[in-house]
């Protein structure tokens, strides 16, 4: 891992790095010493590792919870070179938008294709991150990603036993791979986000993916609106989810509450 | 409204009351003066207004959020006299349990029948509560109830414009009345809770009810497990929901976050 730049603002140290040729960013508390929980953030399609929403989210986890937060550019995104395949994908999206055709099947196909490259990259970067003092080899690790970051995330979390909790969403079963079989291998706690009127992910496809997760603790949050209209309170909910699962203090599984348990 | 007893513990004043012949309980901050948000709590089937889980929930809303919290015994429950109809219902449940038959359809039928009595009672009690200094005529009012308290709650919230936010759950469309039509009349924010493996409420029936709510802001939380196995973190989530909606500080509707909005 090579650090290529660093800057501090509002108590957060932001360091750009590369691992092999994968560009990434690590946010951590300025001046803090010692291992802490690590949150990996997968960006959405067409975005990149340091988009404003990514940095804002990272700052909250660093300042409020003391986490280290890392993101990488997905293949074909941000500072990555674009392959012919990437160019075809972008052209394909433009054609479909111009023709008024649904993007969902195309995106699902692309997420599957991209994950073949992205999952091994995440694992290599995670190896390197765990060698840092501020992360360490034994700490809890979370992953959060929706849309393209969710499509990659399902496959990454299923493949990576070091991930201990995940927030995933805006992705469904529909697509070229049997994602139900992949999801069934995930057994860590999952908070799964869906948009009830998602124009890119069919409702049954989202519900089917939630159903497929092998996790004992999984919770589905569905809200009205389209793919880009997730309510901001879900970001707060994700923070509480990772507080519970990466900082300990997990509550007992079932409310022993007659108001809840009554028939 | 006649207060029949009062006691204070841990900073919470608990007063039993009757309105007409409806027995109720009001929890409020001991020594506090002035109007505050009111939360109405509907208990589950076979439970009553001061069951331990009810009191525990009330204490949290009173001490952490400064709310007034009220509950009443549903018809045929707690301190209420039982009618012949109530006795038949209990006998019917016992027969079905003994025969190993599913309870769901029976419970849905009973909730519909009970609501005919329970909804007008809630409205009369609410009239009386609003005359108290600690509630007042203009404050925000929430309702929380799952299972039987959810079945009554859907009908109560639909009928009662004074309710400004509701947590409902463990109830579905299936039953003798067209609950979709009722739910469509609800336009206030709703957090809707379902158990993914609910043995009493079919999954599609819960999803259908969520779909039917007329509210612009509605959020579905689904968790694995049966009817009585709702995770305790949903109780915390309900508190945050009412904090947002009854104490103000409502967040903007949509996260303007590229990590979320990306394709």
Image (cartoon, coloured by chain):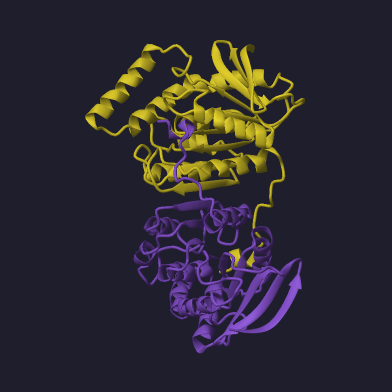
Chain colours: A yellow, B purple
Relative placement, left or right, of A46 versus A22 is: left
Q: Which of A130 and A209 is in front in this view?
A: A130
- Which residue is at the far left? A99
Q: Position of residue B255 (x, y in %)?
A: 47, 39
Q: Position of residue A199 (x, y in %)?
A: 34, 39
Residue at the image point whose x is 56% and y is 33% from the top: A57
Residue at the image point whose x is 37% and y is 67% from the top: B182
As drawn, B229 above or below A132: below
Relative placement, left or right, of B102 versus B68 is: left
Q: Nearer the viewer, residue B71 or A213?
A: B71
Relative placement, left or right, of A87 versus B61 is: left
Residue at the image point whose x is 67% and y is 77% from the top: B15
Residue at the image point whose x is 59% and y is 30% from the top: A58
Q: In which quarter of the image is residue B202?
A: bottom left
Answer yes or no: is residue B180 visible.
Answer: yes
Q: Where is residue B32 in the image (x, y as percent from the top left)?
A: 68, 68
In the picture, the quarter occupied by the C terminus of chain B is top left
As drawn, A111 above or below B15: above
As drawn, A97 above or below A191: above
In the picture, the quarter occupied by the N terminus of chain B is bottom right
Q: Nearer the viewer, residue A208 or B45?
A: B45
Answer yes or no: is residue A156 visible.
Answer: no
Q: Nearer the viewer, residue B32 or A141?
A: B32
- Which residue is at the far front? B34
């Amino acid at each position: 891992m090579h650090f290529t730049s660093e800057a501090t603002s509002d108590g957060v140290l932001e360091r750009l790095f590369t691992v092999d040729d994968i560009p990434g960013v690590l946010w951590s508390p300025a001046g803090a010493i010692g291992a802490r929980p690590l949150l990996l953030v997968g960006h959405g399609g067409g975005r990149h590792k340091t988009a404003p929403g990514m940095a804002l989210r990272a700052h909250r986890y660093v300042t409020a919870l003391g986490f280290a937060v890392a993101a990488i550019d997905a293949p074909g995104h941000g500072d990555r070179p674009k392959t012919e395949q990437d160019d075809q994908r972008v052209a394909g999206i433009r054609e479909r938008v111009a023709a008024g055709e649904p993007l969902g099947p195309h995106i699902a196909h692309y997420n599957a294709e991209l994950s073949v490259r992205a999952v091994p990259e995440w694992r290599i970067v995670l190896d390197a991150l765990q060698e840092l003092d501020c992360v360490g080899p034994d700490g809890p690790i979370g992953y959060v990603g929706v849309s393209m970051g969710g499509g990659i995330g399902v496959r990454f979390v299923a493949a990576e036993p070091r991930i201990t909790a995940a927030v995933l969403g805006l992705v469904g079963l529909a697509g070229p791979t049997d994602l139900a079989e992949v999801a069934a291998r995930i057994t860590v706690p999952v908070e799964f986000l869906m948009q009830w009127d998602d124009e890119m992910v069919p409702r049954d496809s989202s519900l089917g993916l939630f159903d497929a997760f092998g996790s004992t603790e999984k919770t589905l949050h569905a809200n009205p609106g389209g793919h880009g209209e997730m309510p901001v309170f879900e970001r707060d909910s994700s923070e509480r989810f990772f507080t519970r699962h990466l900082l300990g203090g997990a509550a007992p599984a079932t409310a022993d509450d007659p108001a809840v348990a009554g028939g």
